Structures are given as structure tokens and as C-alpha cells.
Image (spheres, grey):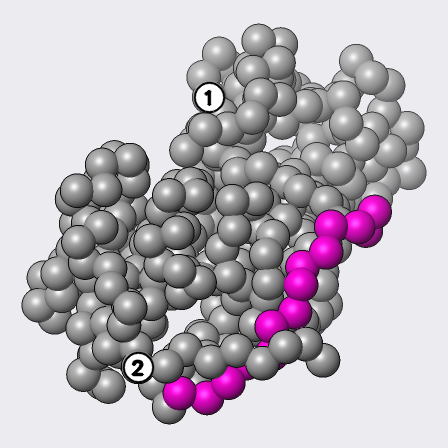
């Protein structure tokens, strides 16, 4: 089962990163009268969290929680003095990679909350990768941070499978995952506060483990119209709301498509027909693609007239750049 580990006498918490789970962590710790400091980047701390209707910065100011905005963690003089033997560090959606000198500061009390299974789903990019791969198993892993990314020892591993009726919606999958993650994290924090023990289990890298990098909708989400229709539909749905949508061109202008589905036709589309709008019906646009038709909402194309016979296309330089690793 693994070796037992307990975090005794934790009186204060340093939270690195941002996103919805940081709200949840802070909310629990406030109720338990714990000292909190949040360390985040300017982008993350000012990002509006839709569910809460405010940014993390606004929430922290409202609740009188101390925060530090950094470009990176290199200048330890700005925050290392906050760490002592009663400090627990928690990383949640943190964009920074911790170096050994930062890990050593916490002496085994620096944890990462990874919103998927380890070691089988290492890296970032979230549920976008799940939809692209049509892999609907996910989970939450809380582990001790080591220099190697998504490695070390885990203390919590929980898995779940997304219901079939939400697998075409990134938003619904995110909400479903978040609900489970919040429950797990609240249970984790309860055990920390009550000084309960965890079972420490080594995260082994095996041939079954794989790594996927973070993604940028602006840079990576360009549709390749030579792909199979199913691949294109999965790609569009993978970058849908709350993101900006998958990008392509229409009439020399960039449009972003939020949602798509397959339309089985008794037709065989020639490659020259890929991307061509061949039918418009009830505010839906039908586009030719390899193997099947694709249905998208007319509102995503921003114009309603003169669409029939027009082509959706993506410039080669956009496709080439989309294969580069995103840096966020």
C-alpha cells in the first residue's frame, strides 16, 4: 500500500498558481483560520474565473489574503522568507517548473495537484488532450514535487470516467471534473488540518506513461482540412468554450468555431471539396470533409449570407506553426 506520511504542525500555506481550485483551497483554509499566501503570475492572478465572477486577485483582496505577483520563482528573496518548518506549499495549475533549490526550501512539504492520472497522463493541456484522443478516463493525483515533472511520490490517486452524454462538450467535462476535484481536495485539506496520515506511493515511469505539453488556443488550434471529418470534429470540440474555439479562414478572415458534429451523407467528398460549404439549413452550415460532412453553427462564421459554395481553409504557415510547442 505504501509508506505512511504525515504533515504535522502545519500552520500556514503557500499556494502557487491560479485557477478555480485555488479559490476552493483558500475557502477551506479561511474557514479553518489558516495563514495563506498566494504566489502567482500577473496573467493567472488577473484571469477572471467564470464560476466565481471575479479574478483571483479580486477574491484575494476581498478576503484579505496576502499575495505576491512574480514573473518567475528565481528571485527567492521575494518569497523564501515565508517558508519555515510549519509551511506547506501547494501547486495548483502553476505554470512554473520548480527547481531543486525551491523544492529543498520546503523539505518534503511541497505538493502538486495534478488534474489527471499519473504516471499515465503527465504534462499539461488538460481535457483538450482527452477529447483529441477520445480518452475519457481521468482523475486527480496529489504528489510530492521533485525536479522531474509529474514524478516523485503520490499521496492521493483517484480515477473516474466521464459519462457518455458529456464527452462532446469541453465545458461539461471541465465542470464534471472540477466537481470531483473539489471534493478530493477538500478531503485532502481536512486530513492535513486534522494531522491524518497518507500513504506515499512511488510514481513509476513505465512504458504506459506518456507526456503531453501545455496548449495555446491562439497558437495551436488551427484546423487542418485534410484530416478525417471525425478528427476535425474532435479537434473543434477540444478547443471549444471556455476557450476561443478552433481557428480557420473564411473570406480571408480568421473565424473560430466552437462546436461541431458529424453529418453522415451518401456522398464521397473529393479532397478538392474539403472545407467547402455545400448546404445551409436552419442556421447550420454543412462542410465537406474526408469520409463525412461536418455541421457547425452559422453564428461561428460571423456572416449569414453568401456562404454557400465558400471554402473554409487554413494557411500552411499557420498549420506549420501550430505544431510547435506552446509556451504559456
Q: Position of residue 111 (x, y in %)?
A: 44, 62
Tell me what residue is drawn at x 50 percent, y 28 percent.
326
The image quadrant where one finds the C terminus is: top left
Task: State which mark lies toward you, 2 or 1.
Answer: 2
**Disc assigned to residue 26:** none
> Mark 2 or 1 closer to N-term?
2
**Disc assigned to residue 254:** 1
Q: In terms of image quadrants, where is residue 15? A: bottom left
Q: In terms of image quadrants, where is residue 16? A: bottom left
Tell me what residue is drawn at x 45 percent, y 28 percent.
327
**Disc assigned to residue 9:** 2
Q: Position of residue 110 (x, y in %)?
A: 41, 60
Q: Position of residue 238 (x, y in %)?
A: 60, 45
Residue 207 forms part of the magenta stretch: yes
Q: Secondary structure at mark 1?
A: strand
Horizontally, is 211 left or right of 56 in the view?
right
Query: Can you say whether 1 is above or below 325 in the image?
Result: below
The image quadrant where one finds the N terminus is: bottom right
Q: Secondary structure at mark 2?
A: loop
The magenta segment: 195-208
Amino acid at each position: 500500500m505504501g509508506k505512511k506520511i504525515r504533515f504535522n504542525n502545519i500552520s500556514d500555506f503557500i499556494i502557487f498558481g491560479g485557477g478555480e481550485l485555488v479559490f476552493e483551497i483558500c475557502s477551506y483554509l479561511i474557514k479553518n483560520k489558516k495563514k495563506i499566501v498566494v504566489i502567482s503570475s500577473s496573467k493567472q492572478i488577473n484571469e477572471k474565473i467564470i464560476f466565481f465572477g471575479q479574478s483571483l486577485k479580486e477574491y484575494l483582496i476581498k478576503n484579505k489574503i496576502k499575495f505576491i505577483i512574480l514573473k518567475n520563482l528565481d528571485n527567492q528573496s521575494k518569497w523564501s522568507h515565508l517558508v519555515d518548518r510549519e509551511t506547506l506549499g501547494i501547486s495548483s495549475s502553476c505554470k512554473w517548473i520548480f527547481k531543486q533549490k525551491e523544492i529543498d526550501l520546503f523539505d518534503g512539504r511541497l505538493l502538486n495537484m495534478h488534474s489527471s492520472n499519473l504516471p499515465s497522463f503527465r504534462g499539461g493541456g488538460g481535457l483538450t488532450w482527452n477529447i483529441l484522443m477520445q480518452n475519457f478516463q481521468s482523475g486527480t493525483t496529489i504528489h510530492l514535487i521533485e525536479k522531474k515533472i509529474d514524478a516523485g511520490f503520490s499521496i492521493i490517486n483517484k480515477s473516474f470516467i466521464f459519462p457518455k452524454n458529456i464527452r462532446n462538450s469541453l465545458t461539461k467535462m471541465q465542470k464534471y471534473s472540477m466537481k470531483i476535484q473539489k471534493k478530493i481536495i477538500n478531503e485532502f485539506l481536512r486530513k492535513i488540518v486534522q494531522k491524518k496520515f497518507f500513504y506515499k506511493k512511488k510514481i513509476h515511469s513505465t512504458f504506459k506513461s506518456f507526456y503531453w505539453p501545455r496548449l495555446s488556443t491562439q497558437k495551436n488550434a488551427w484546423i487542418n482540412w485534410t484530416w478525417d471529418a471525425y478528427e476535425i470534429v474532435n479537434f473543434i470540440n477540444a478547443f471549444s468554450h471556455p476557450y476561443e474555439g478552433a481557428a480557420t479562414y473564411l473570406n480571408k478572415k480568421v473565424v473560430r468555431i466552437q462546436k461541431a458534429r458529424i453529418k453522415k451523407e451518401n456522398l464521397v467528398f473529393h479532397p478538392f471539396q474539403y472545407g467547402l460549404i455545400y448546404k445551409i439549413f436552419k442556421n447550420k452550415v454543412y462542410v465537406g470533409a474526408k469520409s463525412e460532412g461536418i455541421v457547425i453553427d452559422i453564428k461561428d462564421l460571423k456572416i449569414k449570407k453568401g456562404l454557400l459554395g465558400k471554402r473554409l481553409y487554413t494557411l500552411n504557415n499557420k498549420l506549420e506553426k501550430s505544431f510547435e510547442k506552446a509556451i504559456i
